[in-house]
Amino acid sequence: MYKADYSQSNREDFRVSRRQEGAAFDHVLGLLRTASAHGVHSTQCAEALYFVEKLWIFLLDDLAHDANELPERLRAGLISIGIWVTREVSAVRLGHTRQLDGLIEINQTVRDGLR
């Protein structure tokens, strides 16, 4: 009985986590789209980059833990994406990149994968 309750609880925790992650990506995508409309020198862009970086640093930290139960290959792929995202955020901040299309596309792809 306890084992069944624990298993059900784990499945529900997983669903809640996925919904929260999806909501975080939805928020970041909204910020990035607004920033794209206002330009990379806007306060909207600064805010979007802050939240994108914050989300991915959180995800990278979680993905790096041995307790993370995602398959190793998926974790490695997501870590690679996260490293690219953080580098791209830096490139935008430094003026090396003037578009947010890549950040929007990759975050959209990851968000869609959560569904």
Image (tube, rainbow, N blue to C red):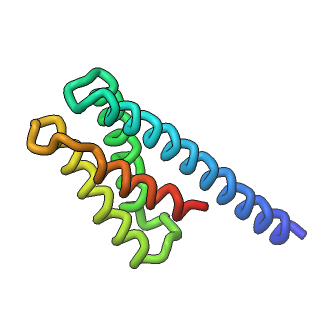
Q: In the image, what residue occupies the spot 54% across and 49% down?
A: 21
Residue 114 location, x and y as percent? 56, 61
Residue that extends furthest to the front in the rendered view of this protein: 37
Residue 88 location, x and y as percent? 21, 49
Q: Is residue 23 left or right of residue 89?
A: right
Quadrant position of residue 62: bottom left
Residue situated in front as seen by the camera: 61 or 39? 39
Up-down: is 36 above or below 88?
Answer: above
> Quick one: quadrant of the C terminus?
bottom right
Q: In the image, what residue occupies the spot 36% across and 61% down?
A: 64
Residue 49 location, x and y as percent? 30, 36
Q: In the image, what residue occupies the spot 24% across and 57% down?
A: 84
Residue that extends furthest to the top in the rendered view of this protein: 43
Q: In the image, what residue occupies the spot 10% across and 37% down?
A: 95
Residue 56 location, x and y as percent? 36, 48
Residue situated in front as seen by the camera: 19 or 31? 31
Q: Is residue 50 left or right of residue 94?
A: right
